[in-house]
Amino acid sequence: MTTLQGHAIHISLDKCRGCVHCMTACPTQAIRIKDGKALIAGDRCIDCGECIRFCPNDAIDSRTTSFQDLSAFKYKVAIPATVLYGQFDNASLPSEILFALRRVGFDYVYELSTICELNTAAIEKYIDGHPRPRPLIASVCPVVVRLIQRRFPSLCENIIPIEPPREIAAKILRANLPRILKIAPADIGIIHITPCPAKMVSINYPVSMEKSYLDGAISIRDIFNPIFQALRQTKEEAIMSRLFPETIFSGIGMGTALSGGETRGLKTHRTVAVSGVRDTMRVLDQVETGLLKDVDLLECMVCPDGCVGGPLAVENRFLAKSRILRLVNLLGERTVMDSSDINALFHKDFLSFQNPIKPIQAHPLDDDAGRAIQKARRRTRLIRQLPGKDCGACGAPDCRTLADDIIRDLAAVSDCPFMKEAK
Amino acid sequence: MMSEESAFHQEFPVAGGDFTRAGKVSCEIKNLVKELGLSDRVVRRIAIASYEAEMNIIMYARAGRLDLSITPDRVQIVVEDSGPGIEDVELAMTEGYSTATPEMRELGFGAGMGLSNIKKNADIFEINSEVGRGTKLQITFLTNGQRA
């Protein structure tokens, strides 16, 4: 088993059969098949998790926090993504699910929809205070931030420098729990529950802050069964949970699990919501060519339909989406955050990035301009020679990528079975 | 300076009226100059100028092409189309001047920024147009071997 430095995706080599499914699905051409096994190039991977979805052998997973890791903390706090509320057919109310999370072993649960509402309000304030550049791009999806750094570096300055709800929630808990509970800060473990493989990366290798406020992330895949069983065994508790509502839920915040959720809270601005990694890349390409200048907020989520389509979720995203939409309708447009509180937090910089997002230069063809041009010429010639079948048999996802690998000395023309025949 | 023979050349044909492929060529050019290691700012300027040039062909010409050539110290895009040509080049270069049809404007095109936007982003800009025949643009970016 190999896990790459700076990433969460890993491939179990014993399960990997060296087929081409993950390789062709990868939107950044980060996967190659070498010696019959899939390999990920760390500098190209953005941890979107497309490969997890497409692997037919369950060989690709993401390194998330395990239940054993939790035992390091005396006091365990869960911050579940609101996506969790759409996962269970035996619980229709968020309070039941939060109640079950306590049964599973958490001492405290913190509901995220209110903080999602806070985030939307802060984004609106930021837009109003910054007439340029346009479009501003929301930074809630950690893969979008990584994608922009590597593929669209000139758009780093368009990213709204406001921390995502999960980090703000953890920051609030860090600031208050030790005092309230009289427990040493190190004994408190704050864990995000998520359908997303990239959250672990954003916790272990944060880009906008020195250190994440979260201690880890458990995947919905891993925690689904314990919660499901807890919900099943505790029919009576379901009644109790309704008598002890865990918290107040926000209709605006609840919707942010779905594509278009962040933009829904903004009434007077021009907004565009995109979901899916390839569509996100297509739209960011357009932004780089100077389009969408009249759009105030561009919301990009690399999972289809938003976080609800995350690869580490369990329930199919259409059902999950339908359940969350029902909650959104139930809760309505009612806001729960106090606008003067939002103002105060915003102006105290409580919600802002510590560090700006910096571009990460992708490897150019060569460090010398003249040699880079020569390599580009050679690649164009190679692309013309290769069969153009994009079959993947050489171990690269398509002929163009093989040509690119060849000029970078990572592959040889003879890797292509058709070129061998021609000889 | 490098000799012409060692420059990178690629021709990108563009069909007039083909809105479904709008942006494909400029995107390809953008990704190519990124891989050559040019700085983000230059890449951005090249991207915007080539997009405007590509759209001008799609919106107004029957056909045309973008000829890209790259040497270590410059990126040049020669845009040639066979189309109606421009009667008053000076007027066409004014910001906000546009002959776009209402349909084009509805699609978000034709804000009258095209040619002036290309000029603004280029280091050297030349335009020659002949009514009834077509238009030729020569757009040059001086990169001076500048690297990211």
Image (cartoon, coloured by chain):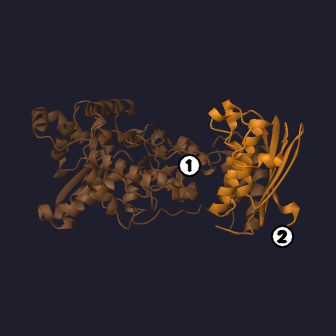
Closer to the camera: disc 1 or disc 2?
2
Between the residue at mark 1 and the residue at mark 2, the CA separation in whole angstroms equals 46 Å
- The secondary element bearing badge 2 is classed as loop
Question: Which residue is the site of mark 1?
Answer: A36
* Residue type pointed to by label 2: Met
* Residue in the picture at 30% in, 58% down: A345
Tell me the colour chain B is drawn in: orange
**Residue B35 position within the rendered picture, expressed as x and y whole percent measured from the top left:** 67, 58
**Residue position for label 2:** B1
Amino acid carrying label 1: it is Gly
Q: Is residue A146 above or below residue A389?
A: below
Q: In x, y percent, where is residue A41?
A: 54, 57
Q: In the image, is A73 to the left or to the right of B59?
A: left
What subunit carries mark 1? A
Q: Position of residue A286 (x, y in %)?
A: 61, 46
- When the figure is inspected, residue A251 is found, relative to residue A378, above or below; the finding is above
| Chain letter of disc 2 in the image | B
How far across and how far down the image is residue B142, in percent? 76, 65
- How packed is label 2: few (under 14 Cα within 10 Å), some, or many (20 or more)? few
Taking the spot 12% from the left edge, 65% from the top edge, the residue there is A182
The hue of chain A in the figure is brown
Is disc 1 placed on a helix, strand or loop?
Answer: loop
